Image (cartoon, rainbow, N blue to C red):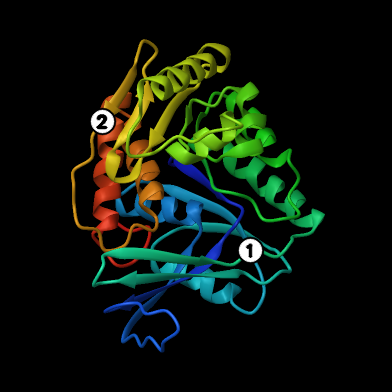
Amino acid sequence: MVKKYFLSICLNPVMQKTILLENLYENEVNRSKEYYFTASGKGANVSRVLSQLGENVILLTQAGGFHKDLFVCKLESDGVPCSWVESQSEIRFCYTLLNRAKHTTTEIVEEAESVGLEVENEIYMKYCELLHNCHTLIISGTKAAGFSKDIYPKMVFDAKKIGKKVILDIKGEDLINCLEYQPDIIKPNYDEFASTFFDDYSFRENKVNDNEHELLKSRMTEIYELHGSTTILTRGKFGAMFWDGRELVYIPAEQITPINTTGCGDAFTAGFGSAWKTSNIYVSIQNGMEMAKRNALLIKPGVIK
């Protein structure tokens, strides 16, 4: 009997280089004795944390170019089962600069090269093969140029049609186009939600005033009533909020001195998904926040140990 698993989608993979610096000076030579390569992208990070939590997970992604073997090898060494297709395009690099003196995380992000139509077709064929034996579909992050606007909605539709749970950590048009197919959970961060659903927004993550509270409550209620989707908004060090069907609930975060905040949202998604198999939303969010905290206290992104 095949064990059920999380099916994690990552259509914008990346090789992440994390560089630890005692301090970061502009217009100067900054030398580092400590740096790491990690197979990353939001879906890859989610998959790695799920694996570290002891969950069965399969990552579906694309890879290509000179560094594709390194990407796949890094996933394998992290214990992440991966089903991938050849993208015929170089996998992008991103760089995380950790400033020990100021406890800051600075990211330099390369835009992904475009993929061809055949890549989407092959990804979708593999998706259809993997979908039936999963219990939960998790789609995380943006997609590389070349993928159609239909790929995410099509995946959500297929999953819900056969009764799978669906968690979305996406934003903008991708998120809006998926809602009609009734994903169970949508989990953008606070800024992503505001920019997706409010054209002229000036919301501040650190403080939600009464007017913003009512606007958020109204939109989350609308999403819940129209699509049956529960909205969870992560707010970094300010915790999380969610709509429980009756009220907007705020959950504070434990205050820490972070080492690397890259991948914290992905660790949250994994922690939430793991707990949500057997627990309610509130408990699952608390578990997500605990995994995000663990990630923030480590150097590598998308890890909890």
- How crowded is the residue under tag 2: few (<14 C-alpha within 10 Å), some, or many (20+)? some
Task: Give the left or right position of residue 87, taking residue 274 as reference.
Answer: right
Counting the numbered discs, the total is 2
Residue 193, position as x, y percentages in the image: 51, 34
Task: Give the left or right position of residue 59, taking residue 264 as reference.
Answer: right
Kind of residue at badge 1: Glu
Kind of residue at badge 2: Ile
- Say which element carries label 1: loop
- Residue at horizontal 49 percent and vertical 72 percent from the top: 73
Locate residue 209: give its quadrant. Answer: top left
Q: In this view of the protein, which residue sits in the foreground, 233 or 27?
A: 27
- Residue at horizontal 31 percent and vertical 87 percent from the top: 33
Can you identify the residue that label 1 sits on?
A: 111
Can you identify the residue that label 2 sits on?
A: 251
- Say which element carries label 2: strand
Q: Is residue 265 above or below residue 273?
A: below
Residue 237, position as x, y percentages in the image: 28, 45
Of mark 2 and mark 1, the one earlier in the sequence is 1
The numbered mark at residue 183 is none
Task: Give the left or right position of residue 35, taking residue 158 as reference.
Answer: left
Query: Can residue 2 be seen in this snapshot?
Result: no
